[in-house]
Image (cartoon, grey):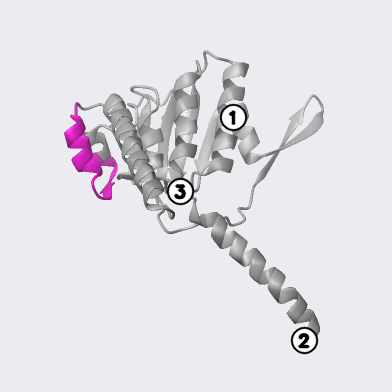
Amino acid sequence: MLTLLESLSPRILSTTAMYNASRLGSMRFSSLPGMQAHRSWTPTPYVTETVGGGWHTYDIFSRLLKERIVCLNGAVDETVSASIVAQLLFLEADSPEKPINLYINTPGGSVTAGLAIYDTMTYIASPVTTICVGQAASMGSLLLCGGQAKKRYCLPHSSIMVHQPSGGYFGQASDIAIHAKEILRVREQLNGIYKRHLTKPHTLEEIERLMERDKFMGAEEALEVGIVDEILDRRVKEGDGEEQGAR
């Protein structure tokens, strides 16, 4: 037994050392500093429909996709970004003139992954309506704000948080200076995106002050700042003769 452990120890140590070494030169701009995204299993409901005398079963997200609804749930990373981008491109190819509804409930995540979603939203022909349910923090708030003008909503008890990007890098001093310059460039780029989409006029200096630290907002404050256009109280039923449930 000792011989077996001794023979395995160098390999284990070597693998660990290589893993740590691979992290030394890594940098990732994120809204979750010092944390690794934890993925837990999420139960997925299924929907069964009768189609042409037969049965067709969808998972709930595929069924919503047929209604041009895309859900962004959880931290934004490369995997989530790839899924959202693919759904947006598919829906545009299916019907370019019809709007897409993007429901957002995220604590934020990778800036580069989030910008891939944002660029796709602005690139495709289909207008993208954004709706915040739960929270839209950091990169989530940028995606919420980056939706189609006058079509950005949140529910009454939503939480919106904005802040400047964070990141980390380990390496030579000259490389650290290069990456520090890059994160400042990214911060300026993100501030410019907010300035372009906010419904209320803000200077870049005002946006920089707003983003200096974590800034949490409720629905009313997000509406006042200009991140969203309306607060939705409820879905309006056709023919009920009541006014639209928005503020």
Write down the residue under mark 2. 2
Q: Are marks 3 and 2 in contact (CB under 8 Å)?
A: no
Q: Residue 27 has which mark?
A: 3
Q: Is 131 or 1 nearer to us in this picture? A: 1
Mark 1 to mark 3 CA distance (whole Å): 28 Å
- Compared across the picture, whether 77 is left or right of 187 comes to right
Magenta-colored span? 201-221
- Compared across the picture, whether 225 is left or right of 48 comes to left
Pinpoint residue 186: horizontal percent, then vertical percent.
Answer: 35, 36
Say whether disc 2 or disc 1 marks the residue closer to the N-terminus: 2
Q: Is 56 or 166 nearer to us in this picture? A: 166
Quadrant in which residue 115 is drawn = top left
Query: Does 80 lie within the magenta span?
Result: no
Mark 3 belongs to which amino acid? Answer: Met
Q: Nearer the viewer, mark 2 or mark 1?
A: 2
Query: Does 214 lie within the magenta span?
Result: yes
Write down the residue under mark 1. 87
- Compared across the picture, whether 66 is left or right of 216 comes to right
Judging from the image, what secondary structure is the residue with disc 2 in? Answer: helix
Say whether disc 3 or disc 2 marks the residue closer to the N-terminus: 2
Mark 1 belongs to which amino acid? Answer: Gln
- Compared across the picture, whether 141 is left or right of 205 comes to right
